Amino acid sequence: MRVEKFVNILQASFFTGVPDSQLKALCNYLMDIYGVDGQHHIIAANEGNCAAIAAGYHLATGNVPVVYMQNSGEGNIINPLASLLNDHVYAIPCIFVVGWRGEPNVPDEPQHVYQGKVTLQLLKDMDVQTCIVGPDTTPEELEQTMLAFRPLLSQGKQVAFVVRKNALKYDGKITYANENTMLRESIIRHITQASGDDPIVSTTGKASRELFEIREAQQQPHDRDFLTVGSMGHASSIALGIALQRPEKKIWIVDGDGAALMHMGAMAILGAYKPANIVHIVINNGAHETVGGQPTVMRNIDLVTVAKGCGYPEALRVDTFDALDQALTAARAQSSLSLIEVRCAIGARENLGRPTTTARKNKEHFMAFLQK
């Protein structure tokens, strides 16, 4: 289905969400038509953030908002969905558009398999009526569904369109770029050289994929790396849990700007405990690159000042490899929590692969490495 037709059938004028590769057509269309103007479209920090923004929009206008997200974000919306939007509370109508990663019997990455299995059940448990949109869904079918949904929305209930792979199409060409020059894969290669045999906790998306391939290319073992392939935004908290129990080991975090933004409160907890054995590296390209390149607000945020305000004793920003190498060397020698923000270009290899080991094996090998 053409995404223009899909949006027209929704009859909505406000969208907020977290980008998803399954919804790339919708995301690109919204960026093409609205950008991130605030009046019609906002890319939020996380899905719960989206639900609250949508509630505020409804309170101000009386109109029905649309929240779009990957199904992995369902966990983030459960609290505002149950205790804010629900018709037993404030009865705030909302249309959810959910990318269905890990749909049963459709091959996908391991972190999506269970989430895909429970996607529809979670929505049902939250009293959200659903409609599955596939490549063969017709506009007429969707229009009939919206007719059935309208009375529910008028009662302050929520509905959802669960979107299968390749269900939406958009012909517009959107190019996402910034002025930075360093590529993330090269940045991570420098980090692996500086960290030596220290453990690394890497974030969701292409960063972990690139770390895995760098180890392969250098014929190095993978046991020192914990690849946080799911649970976006939680890599730094995982690292904190490790660092406090294993103070004799230097723990390196390879984070992304979208991930750090999604649960930025984690930085406050890190800053409060100040583990002297953590180096927190945020590779900031101002984009949700793994799912298409749509912008984050992090390109305009002074993350160094944020880190210092959260209590990080050391924090700096770099945008050249010479400055990066100096910062990495200094961080390894320091006995204090430090943050390095690395300004990064948007882009990755077309032939970038994925980890060939299972998530459980990664966990087992990493735990064994920590005991050495």
Image (cartoon, rainbow, N blue to C red):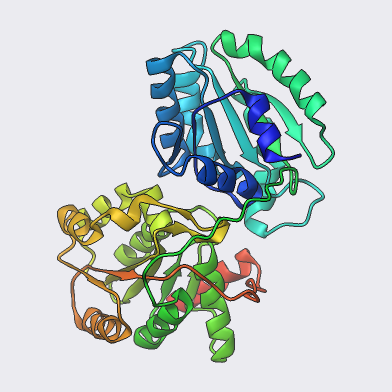
Residue 113 appears anywhere in the view:
yes
Q: Residue furthest right?
A: 136
Q: Quadrant of residue 111?
A: bottom right
Left or right, 94 with respect to 43, comes to right
Give how far across and how far down residue 325 sits, in percent: 29, 85
Question: For this rendering, which residue is in front, 135 or 217?
Answer: 135
Answer above or below: position of 168 versus 288: above
Which residue is at a point 56% across and 71% down the rendered structure image? 209
Answer above or below: position of 40 versus 184: above
Left or right, 84 with respect to 100, comes to left
Which residue is at a point 48% across and 20% down the rendered structure image? 85
Left or right, 134 with respect to 355, comes to right
Give how far across and how far down residue 158 sits, in percent: 58, 20
Residue 371 appears anywhere in the view:
no
Dividing the image into 4 quarters, which one contains the C terminus?
A: bottom left
Left or right, 225 with respect to 117, comes to left
Answer above or below: position of 97 versus 129: below
How many numbered marks are there? Answer: 0
Give how far across and how far down residue 188 sits, in percent: 43, 78
Give how far across and how far down residue 226 sits, in percent: 49, 69
Question: For this rendering, which residue is in front, 146 or 47?
Answer: 146
Q: Quadrant of residue 217?
A: bottom right
